[in-house]
Amino acid sequence: MKLFYRILFFLIGLLSLSFGISLAIVSGLGSGAWDALNVGLSETIGFTPGTWVILVGIFLIILNAFLLQTRPDIGAVITLFITGVFIDFWLLQIFDDLVLNEFLSKMIILLAGLLAMGIGISIYMQAKFPLSPIDNLMLALRKRFGFSFMVAKTVGEITALILAFIFGGPIGIGTLLVTFAVGPLIQLFSPRFDGLFNRLTAVQR
């Protein structure tokens, strides 16, 4: 039964994360740094943003292995694939015709996306399945350099921001909010979902 809850937290977390990412993109106020990079690559080179989630993620798997001095986490490709498919689902199937004209509505969508991202990451981390390489980068930086979750996440986001700028990704106020707000949100929600997961699995023992 514990495996059931791990899978449940994993899928719900990724669904929430991809939902939040997609909301930030469609807000038109600038998406998260990694997502801006993926959108920029999509518009510059081709392929869907979800496809670039997978391709960029494979590169990060190799980088994380270097930082942790371990073998590449091949299992993370599953997380990449699911996330990429979910993002393309939200963007191309659900939000394809969504048009936001007012700044207030754009900001509400963006803030909802931020919240969904922070919650999503905090949920799926509890499953202890292979993490998204972006989030694994956060953990790798934390373990290698002793950073807090907040600092490690922010370092990764700033690096992606520079790359997104180079490739002409959608950068704006939303990018800054995602860069500096998702880390603290994870710091806030992670202990709560950790407690929830432990309570649910303890009942089944």
Image (tube, rainbow, N blue to C red):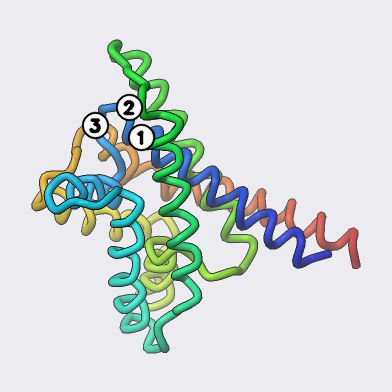
What amino acid type should be assigned to the residue bearing mark 3? Ile
Instruction: Decide which of tag 1 and tag 3 comes sooner along the chain.
Output: 1
Q: Position of residue 107 (x, y in %)?
A: 35, 22
**Residue at the spot 53% in from the left edge and 51% down from the top edge:** 14
Residue located beneath label 3 in the image: 173
Question: Label 2, label 1: how many angstroms apart (C-alpha)?
Answer: 5 Å
Question: Label 3, label 2: how many angstroms apart (C-alpha)?
Answer: 11 Å
**Residue at the spot 76% in from the left edge and 61% down from the top edge:** 4
Q: Are marks 3 and 2 in contact (CB under 8 Å)?
A: no
| Residue at disc 3, secondary structure | helix
What amino acid type should be assigned to the residue bearing mark 1? Ala
Q: Are marks 2 and 1 in contact (CB under 8 Å)?
A: yes
Q: Residue furthest top?
A: 102
Question: Label 1, label 3: how many angstroms apart (C-alpha)?
Answer: 11 Å
**Label 3: few (<14), some or many (≥20) within 10 Å?**
some
Q: Is residue 68 above or below residue 203?
A: below
Kindly identify which numbered label has been placed on residue 27. Answer: 2
| Residue at disc 2, secondary structure | helix
Q: Position of residue 113 (x, y in %)?
A: 43, 34
Q: Across the whole image, how many numbered discs are drawn on residues?
A: 3
Residue located beneath label 1 in the image: 24
What amino acid type should be assigned to the residue bearing mark 2? Ser
Q: Position of residue 134 (x, y in %)?
A: 38, 62
Instruction: Decide which of tag 3 and tag 2 comes sooner along the chain.
Output: 2
**Residue at the spot 41% in from the left edge and 88% down from the top edge:** 70
Can see residue 174? yes
| Residue at disc 1, secondary structure | helix
